[in-house]
Structures are given as structure tokens and as C-alpha cells.
Amino acid sequence: MRPEDAADASGLLATVTQLGQLVGVATFGTLFLGRYADSGAQASADALWATALALAAASLVGAVAGLPRRSR
């Protein structure tokens, strides 16, 4: 990358980070509220458990995607 492109790369990184946060909050919030509305007496616990499992799965996918790749 050329030094002249640093400002553009910085702006793109900030925008993509904020977009990822927005989509994550919307996705997991929708999951939680959807499970909360569908649950019975233990609505909060069931919704929290389902959301926690989804967050753990997303974290695992992110960790695996961030692993360095072997070059041949």
C-alpha cells in the first residue's frame, strides 16, 4: 500500500467497523427479542441462552477466520 492511501484505508476501516457493530447489535438484538416473545414462563433465560450460544458461535467463526493461513 502506498502512504498516500493511508487516509482512505483508515476511513474505510472505521466505516466497516461501525457497520459491523450496527449489524451485530441488530442481529443479536432481533434474535434475543424474537426468542423472548416466543418463550413462556422462562422467557428471559431462554432468550439469553439462545443469544449467548449464537454469540459464541459467531466468536468461534471470527477466531477461525482470523487464523494465519499457511502458504505453500
Image: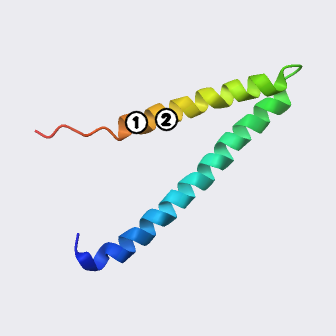
Q: In the image, is 11 to the left or to the right of 4? A: right
Quarter of the image that includes the C terminus = top left
Up-down relation of residue 4 to residue 12 (above or below)? below
* Residue wearing tag 2: 59
Q: Position of residue 44 (x, y in %)?
A: 81, 27
Q: Position of residue 70 (x, y in %)?
A: 18, 37
The label number, if any, that marks residue 26 in the structure image:
none
- In the picture, residue 54 is in which quadrant? top right
Up-down relation of residue 18 to residue 35 (above or below)? below
Up-down relation of residue 57 to residue 13 (above or below)? above
Near mark 1 (Cα within 10 A), the count class, few <14, some 14-19 or many ≥20, is few
Q: In the image, is 55 to the left or to the right of 32? A: left
Quarter of the image that includes the N terminus = bottom left
Q: Element at badge 2?
A: helix
Q: How many marks?
A: 2
Q: Element at badge 1?
A: helix
* Residue wearing tag 1: 63
